[in-house]
Image (tube, rainbow, N blue to C red):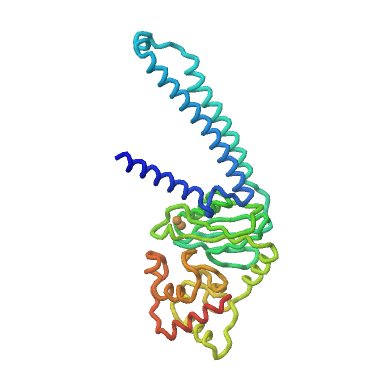
Amino acid sequence: MRASRIRFLFLWISLWLLVGWQDSPSVMSPNSEQAREINNLWIFMLVLGTIVYVIVMGLLGVGLLRRRASRSEVETTPPPRGNTFIVVSGVIIPLVILAILFVFTLQTMAALSDEEPKPLRVQVIGHQYWWEVVYPDHGVITANEIHIPAGQPVEFIFTSADVIHSFWVPELNGKVDLIPGRTNSMFIDEVDPGVYRGQCAELCGLQHAKMAFYVYADAPADFEVWLTQQAEPAPLPESGSLALEGQQIFLGSSCVYCHTIRGTNASSRLGPDLTHLASRETIGAGILPNTRGHLAGWIVDAQSIKPGNQMPPMYLESEDLQALLTYLETLE
Ligand code: CUA
């Protein structure tokens, strides 16, 4: 009995440590000015909470030991009235601590909400179950992979096309909801170069757990190259090539009812913009590496990979599928 309890406790503590102290994504490794502010507040709360906990437990211990020594004495003494110790420790001290926390929290909130216009705006639109990413000042639309220049301020503008989602990159900032018919915003600054995993943090349906995305904080020069390249229309396949055949299959099938490929007639925004699909590292909202095999599986039967998503199965002859894949691979 005792051994099993100890084992359970050990398991519980290890699980807790694993969840809390993994490398990425982790709220404990802040990589932006805003995340550092949040982290500082959290550490302050943790230290304050630990001090209070140790004092309370210490007093409890003292009380328990004392009472045990003189039980008969306690039973005969009437309880004290108007004890100032109780008033101070139970009312005044907690009020003071909460007031200090309140002030620090307000300071952090003020630091997070910067109203100055930022040089780069990124609009993120939540969909069941993927993220549409628009750079409104640069004519760029992409999905699930957000590139930003490291070290420079960025403003995010959030809205939703269907239900409420929540944008959360633990290493960069707190959560912000994406609400239909409403616009929310978030600022990040001084982001360290790197790749940060984000996750939808508001239950939005069957595939909420598989609604991931990545933020790439590139060197500013690399970001400019990426942005310029993303603003271009899709490259045209050479005449007589397999890719051209694939393009005709794409344009002649139901793909065009949901997807855009800039430079062709496909211009629907129900599904992700595919103009530069091959430049992305993942498909299906951050859940699969963008390889030919995964892409083939996704096109043929996305429902078996991510049940409940909006992509219907596609019935294609195998040669047509190969041509289509070849075309999609040219969309860099
Ligand atoms: Cu979108 Cu959960």
Report ligand 1 position as a quadrant: bottom left
Along the line of sight, the residue nearer the viewer: 171 or 181: 171
Instruction: In the rendered view, tell whether residue 173 sits above or below residue 48.
Output: below
Q: Which residue is drawn at 50% across and 21% down?
A: 89
**Left or right: 12 in relation to 261:** left
Could you tell me residue 252's position as x and y percent? Answer: 46, 82
- Residue beneath the point at 64% across and 55% down: 192
Residue 314: image quadrant is bottom left
Q: Which residue lies furthest to the right in this view?
A: 221
Would you place residue 137 above or below residue 58 in this image? below
Residue 262: x, y in percent? 57, 75
Q: Quadrant of the C terminus?
A: bottom right
Say left or right for 185 vs 323.
right
Look at the image and tell me in which quarter the N terminus lies: top left
Instruction: Give x and y (percent) for residue 117.
Output: 67, 53
Q: Nearer the viewer, residue 180 or 95?
A: 95
Residue 216: name its quadrant: bottom right
Q: Which of 90 and 49 is in front in this view?
A: 49
**Residue at horizontal 53 percent and vertical 53 percent from the top:** 23
Could you tell whether 115 is left or right of 2 in the image?
right
Query: Which of 80 and 64 lies nearest the eye of the viewer?
Result: 64
How many badges with numbers are in the image?
Answer: 0
Residue 176's x, y, as percent?
53, 50
